Image: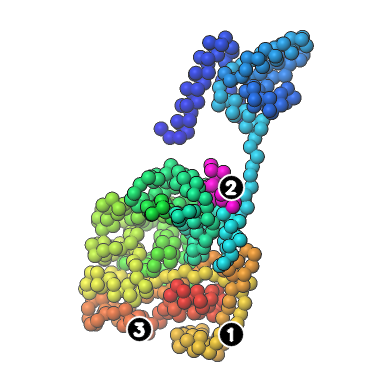
Amino acid sequence: MNEDELQQKRRENEEAATANRARILNLPYLDTRNFEASVPLVSGLLDIEEMRQSFILPLQKGGDGAHYQFMITSQTPRSVLAELRERYEREGERADFFLISGSAFRVFMLRYDPPREVHYDDIKIAAEGDSETIASVSETLNSVGSDKVFDFLLEQADKLGASDIHIENLKGEIRVRMRVDGLLHPVANLDKDRYRVIMGELSSRANVSAASDKPQSGHLQMDIHRSGSTHTLNVRVETIPTMYGQDAVLRLFNFDESLLSLDLLGLSEEELLELKDIINRPRGLVLMVGPTGSGKSTTLYSLLNALNTTDRKIITLEDPIEYSLTGISQIPIKTNKGGSFAEGLRSVLRLDPDVVMVGEIRDADTAKTAIQASITGHLVLSSFHADSSASAFSRMIDLVGANPIFSNSVRLVIAQRLVRRLTDAKEPYDPDDAIKSYIRDTLQGVDGFNPDEIKLFRPVATPDAPFGYSGRAVIMEQLVVSDDISAFLRGDVAAADAKKIESVARKNGMLTLEQKGLLMALAGVTTIEEVSRVI
């Protein structure tokens, strides 16, 4: 029985009990469920305080032959009824009373005296060393009602564009931090009693235990209403016990399927055509590599969205499913409960898919199964942990060994990073000679680079962007497998280390992550410090 059905059953039981009580008191019973939310309210008979204190509500004004009618509950004092009867009898009128349930009384009172909507100040991200902002946000969060603090935290994180909320138990307080544009920022220090409220909400809504002494995973959804529109916020919850209580990390996925487009990845026209050509082939293996938080999942989903046509059967294996895609069969793989990507992949291949996405290749068994699938008529997409596309090749060779099957399966490896994007308030400057020399050496021979015109940009803080950045941009490195790259995979070339593979790929025209990042810094998209931070 869901929550709505449970509430309905409770109300039915309460109405039945009220009807029985009315018979005992010899009063007419009134079931208000069909009209309590819509019937016009009667004004001028009783004031709000009188209604609330005496548990009595006006139902109909008298006069012109009509009786005065009131709704009462079993808590209404008998003295109040006697007083009203006497008052209207003196005036030549009559007062009738109907017994209603406590729930009905509360519904009407909310209409007569609706709760005042409390508006709290929006959360702001503090700049480094800005203790005043942290103190102000802490005061706001500590003042939010217990029934609203959890939702308020999620709403504010979504409004700030945060990807994660970190709730950490310290000795005397609760520290809240948010990851915005890839960086973790202190937000507030809360009173210890907030821990009980937040963990209580997590327990009931994400299905995690507040008393567990083991790490847990959960999931919840919340509808965000803003500016006349509504979107669904998916939240992945991870908790772990610490010395002073359970710490929680909430990962926020503000999903908009329309934004999953290859055209929004910031690729050049040549790179985009190259990518589309490879993924539109009927078979092969495409790998996405990069650290956690580098946007691999978003790019994989964008590839799936581009392939999602009525003539293709697409199946995904994910741990967990982060976004729900229309028209695609998505299968959760619970690796923490004994499930494996390799086993799941072998099962779904019997369903005759055209495209399969494996959430992550973590072991030799999954790698070999994915390779086998990719040479038997399936396009296989997956992610893999490596620093660069070249190092992904060498790692994969270590995992499955150099062999002709691997060389015939893998088509493309994409390495990716996310950098913070500068706002329009950015400020140009001339870097020193050492940085200019570094840029010239790194970009030597790259088409479009002019070594005599080197200008960089620095962030400028604004009220809307206190750090001078807003949003993030993708740096992407595409290694297309050519014949000379395949030679490493077949074992024709000894010592297939990442440096040798990258050297050959660069001769074939590949731009490295570092080169792509520097070009973006020169174009004013980001700063050289950001490029250095993520690469």
Q: Taking the image as drawn, is residue 263 in sight? A: no
Q: Quadrant of residue 130?
A: bottom right
Task: Classify the position of the N terminus by image quarter.
Answer: top left
The residues tagged by marks 2 and 3 sit, at their Cα atoms, a distance apart of 59 Å
Q: Which residue is mark 3?
A: 503
Residue 164, percent across and down?
47, 58
Q: Secondary structure at mark 1?
A: loop
Question: What residue do we see at 66% from left, 32% from top?
Answer: 113
**Mark 3 crowdedness (10 Å alpha carbons): few <14, some 14-19, many ≥20:** few
The circle drawn on residue 143 is: 2
Front-most of 194 and 352? 194
Front-most of 187 and 311? 187
Q: Amino acid at mark 1?
A: Asp
Question: What residue do we see at 62% from left, 49% from top?
Answer: 120
Q: Secondary structure at mark 3?
A: helix
Residue 279, percent across and down?
38, 66
Name the mark nearer the viewer: 1 or 2. 2
The residues tagged by marks 3 and 1 sit, at their Cα atoms, a distance apart of 31 Å
**Mark 1 crowdedness (10 Å alpha carbons): few <14, some 14-19, many ≥20:** few
Name the mark nearer the viewer: 3 or 1. 1
Q: Reading the chain from its start, which is encountered first: label 2 or label 3?
A: 2
Find out whether the residues at labels 2 and 3 contact each other: C-beta distance under 8 Å. Answer: no
The circle drawn on residue 208 is: none
Is residue 151 in the magenta section? Answer: yes
The residues tagged by marks 1 and 2 sit, at their Cα atoms, a distance apart of 48 Å
Is residue 113 in the magenta section? Answer: no
Q: Taking the image as drawn, is residue 526 in sight? A: yes
Range of the magenta residues?
A: 139-154
Q: Which residue is mark 1?
A: 430
